[in-house]
Amino acid sequence: MRLRSRGRPQESPPPPPPSPEKGAVRRADVTSQGQPAAVKRSLAPSLLHEPAAARLRAAAAADAAAPRADFLWAPPCWLHKPLASLLEDPRDLPILFLLLNVLLTTTPAAAALFLLFPPAARPLPHWLGAVYLLASYAAYLARFMLSLHYSQHRRLFRKGLWPLNLVAPVLLAPLFGVPSGMYHLHHCVMHHVGNNRAEADGSSTERYRRDSPAAFLRYWLRFALAAWLEVPLRCARYRRWGLLAASMAAEAAYFAMGAAAWRANPRAALWVLVLPYWLSSLALMFGNWCQHIFIDPAAPRDSYRLTYNCAGVGDNAMTYNDGYHIVHHLNSTLHWSELPGRLADSLEAHAEHDALCFIGTSFFQVGAAVMAGKYSYLLRHLSRYSARLAAMDDAQLITLLKSRLAPIKA
């Protein structure tokens, strides 16, 4: 991982896994014939089409080596080491840099809209509110959402500094349209535990025709209007009473804060809190729709087949390698810097499960191409890394892609 700054902090490599006792062999590593599983796998014929697999590995390696663009600017180099000492994992410095960017720009700008334009004396001009929103979202929306995302899957600050872990999900999240305290409950608890199953995940894409703009509109409106009820109801359904209390407290605090902000300065509240909620809910739901647009009806519960990977695309440098979504669903606590390498190391497993991988395109571009019926674009970027995919002609590949767009029945 390379930071876009002069110099970089000393990174601590992760500790090596514990070694088994000499001569010990785990039962899971031995086949029914008494042969070590690793040996048997190495003797099995490869499922890969090696030329295409090599290109996919090269794309993953390029993502792993790319300079980080997850933040706009880094603090002076002499601050990197003391800042890294605050973190659970020093490799998360880009997340901390991004949060500092937001704290020093968007946060004071939002406060200025409330304080410098009292509604009775000098109402906030709507054009200025629009400039604030456009500038903040252009600079930070994708970066902040993915910083929030990975800081919820893995604790950002050390255990003794736990209050700092509330800065992003509680204090900063509402500036980007995410209700305080709700992201972890909705994404980590509901989406990842439910794993896109319609009966367990309120953001599941299973039941929708995923190349239909009308179906996406229904999907987005359901989230924007009903997520307030779905998260508490699902907590109650699974008897997660502590999470139920947390979700209700978070919602009550968010609505109380929003009401107070509206009474104090309606125009500022409109541009700082209300419009961001609708814009971000649209962006987040389209992102999730795109990530889970291809679902294999034969195995909709298989993490290899309910999403796909996007490698070798610039978005990965500013979204903590978010393109490796199969790898992320297989292990949501795997550090974001390890995602490209894990894909490269597990291509045989991806091929065994008929997983889809794209090169040089992002989730949003894939989703837009599906909605527009641009299958020629999808085929240009689809990696035919497996022998099965390489053996298919274009018509067969289009049929495969279309088969993964149909609604999954209960």
Image: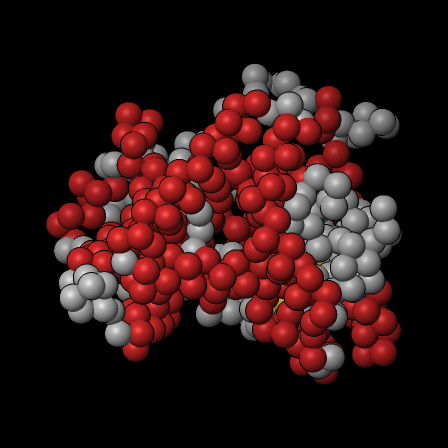
**Residue lying at 73% horizontally and 26% vertically, measured from the top left:** 28
90 and 250: which is toward the camera:
250
Residue 143 against residue 169 in the figure, above or below: below
Residue 361 falls left or right of residue 200: left
**Residue lying at 37% horizontally and 67% vertically, measured from the top left:** 137
Mark count: 0
68 and 40: which is toward the camera:
68
Which percent across, then down, holds residue 189?
57, 36
Which percent across, then down, holds residue 109?
22, 62
Quarter of the image where one finds residue 51: bottom right
Residue 287 against residue 18 in the figure, above or below: below
Which percent across, then down, holds residue 261?
31, 51
Quarter of the image where one finds residue 392: bottom right
Residue 238 falls left or right of residue 58: right
**Residue 326 in view, yes or no:** no
139 and 27: which is toward the camera:
139
360 and 232: which is toward the camera:
232
**Residue 367 in view, yes or no:** yes
Which percent across, then down, holds residue 332?
56, 42
Residue 221 falls left or right of residue 259: right
**Residue lying at 57% horizontally and 69% vertically, measured from the top left:** 364
**Residue lying at 81% horizontally and 74% vertically, measured from the top left:** 398
